[in-house]
Amino acid sequence: MKNFPRLVLCSATGASALAPAACTAPQAPASRPNIVYIMTDDHTAQMMSCYDSRFVETPNLDRIAADGVRFTNSFVANSLSGPSRACMLTGKHSHANGFTNNITAVFDGSQQTMPKLLQKAGYQTAIIGKWHLESIPTGFDHWEIVPGQGDYYNPRFINEQCDTLVNKGYLTNIITDKALHWMDEERDTQKPFCLFIHHKACHRNWLPETKYLSLYEDKTFPLPENFYDDYAGRPAARAQEMEIGRHMDIIYDTKMYNPQLETRLKATYEEFIGRMTAEERAAYDKVYDPIIKQFYAQPPTGKALDEWKYQRYMRDYAKVLKSLDDNVGRVLDYLDEKGLLDNTLVVYTSDQGFYMGEHGWFDKRFMYEESMHTPLVMRLPKGFDRRGDIDEMVQNIDYAPTFLELAGVAVPDDIQGVSLLPLLKGEHPDSWRKSLYYHFYEYPAEHMVKRHYGVRTDRYKLIHFYNDIDVWELYDLQHDPHEMHNLYGEPGYEELTSQLKEELHRLQEQYHDPIEEELKK
């Protein structure tokens, strides 16, 4: 039997270390701070240079961290776009807010949300960009959203009158244009505001702004050490359909257009690039046509093809990210020029992490580190002196109570996240959470990642894959940070496994997740 220290996961009273306190309203500051929340889609910490300098430089995103705080242990509760957004808006896990997946779920706009509570407290609220919750936004004084995933080129927007209008240009720039216009021309300057700037970038299929089409074409990205993972001992990992080599569409994902070749996503690609103007299309073809010609003249095979697809993926992703970083800089510059920066909380994060070739994958969904972990940096308003790294474990259900407490608004008892304000003040509460709960529901679906739930502590992770499979996985993140060796069932880990299952059940009870009862049926 291996000797493990007893996992200390609860407070001394036996109650949750992060159970919501009674609903009490903190004293609102004399000048309530504004909140600018910038969220991207599928932007992972590996592709943000203040977290990882191997691949790209993101100087404007890094400005937020340099002038404020960087969370080193920031996670999501369900690594999928719509569910993640619902968790953020409500401060609740997916089963509690009702939006568990992107296929059948529709967000219930009548429920309590953080923007509604800010509105009631006198804040102006606005959301511009990606919504992806299959409903009309509620709780916002102003909204302009893209339908579905949105279009990179000459995108459509739905306005408050439910009119769908085409806007000329590149989506990342347009979202920022609209956000700056709202702050400059439309908001009531006598009121504090909370603005949600939600980008499509860096979502698949990574269509770059025309001025950056040639960027990174001379760069060779290092291959992840587990790119050729064989998924030994992990049947759920083997069952997925998100491998760069086997599952990336040669036309849709790598842009190798061939009129004679039919692929599953060819028609969608044609629709996307068909939105370009003649001038934009000429610039696009000038870059990609030579690559296409060379590819089909001497097509790589086997591992050479896998690695070629990886390089194309990385280059296009990085190009899309460059425009995003530029536009974050535009927002920071505007706030500075208008004298708003010192009284504004600026938050940058993504709806989840993403795989940049780790395990041979793209996409997200799994509870493994690359997709459960998400970047989170904040520039703090005047009065908050914390700078540097915050190492406590935080989750996207914590954003709602954080914004509410910062605004002097009572945090309702049913919100499951907890305010990060103590951490932003430089405190290190002894009662801070020692574990995180995760639950992914969308299966069968795109990429075929099995349904699963689990618990993560600072060192260990226990996952249960269920539905049409019954498989457990256990990882020691200290000795196996890439989660390659499933320890579940190995001799010597019985006590640790028992402790983690006990903690998992405690979290399910704390958050009232009915999964255990459902599995018994």
Image (spheres, rainbow, N blue to C red):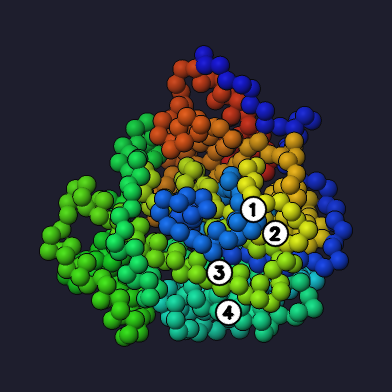
Q: Callout 1: few (<14), some (14-19), or many (20+) C-alpha neighbours within 10 Å?
A: many
Whole-Å distance between the Cαs marked 4 and 2?
24 Å
Q: Is residue 439 left or right of residue 382?
A: left
* Secondary structure found at label 4: helix
Name the kind of residue labelled 1 in the image.
Answer: Val
Name the kind of residue labelled 2 in the image.
Answer: Leu
Q: Nearer the viewer, residue 310 or 22?
A: 310
Q: Mark 2 = which residue?
A: 380
Discs 1, 3 touching: Cβ within 8 Å: no
Q: Name the front one of labels 4 and 2.
A: 2
Name the kind of residue labelled 3 in the image.
Answer: Gly
Q: Mark 3 = which residue?
A: 329
Discs 4, 1 touching: Cβ within 8 Å: no
Whole-Å distance between the Cαs marked 3 and 4?
15 Å
Q: Nearer the viewer, residue 137 or 469?
A: 137
Q: Is residue 365 left or right of residue 74?
A: left
Q: Mark 1 = which residue?
A: 69
User: What residue is drawn where x is 75% and y is 50%?
Assistant: 425
Mark sitting earlier along the chain (4/2): 4
Q: Mark 4 = which residue?
A: 178
Q: Is residue 393 left or right of residue 122?
A: left
Image coords of residue 138 (percent x, y): 67, 70
User: What residue is drawn where x is 36% and y is 49%?
Assistant: 357
Mark sitting earlier along the chain (3/4): 4
Q: Callout 4: few (<14), some (14-19), or many (20+) C-alpha neighbours within 10 Å?
A: some
Discs 3, 4 touching: Cβ within 8 Å: no
Discs 3, 2 touching: Cβ within 8 Å: no
Mark sitting earlier along the chain (3/2): 3
Q: Name the front one of labels 4 and 1.
A: 1
Mark sitting earlier along the chain (1/3): 1
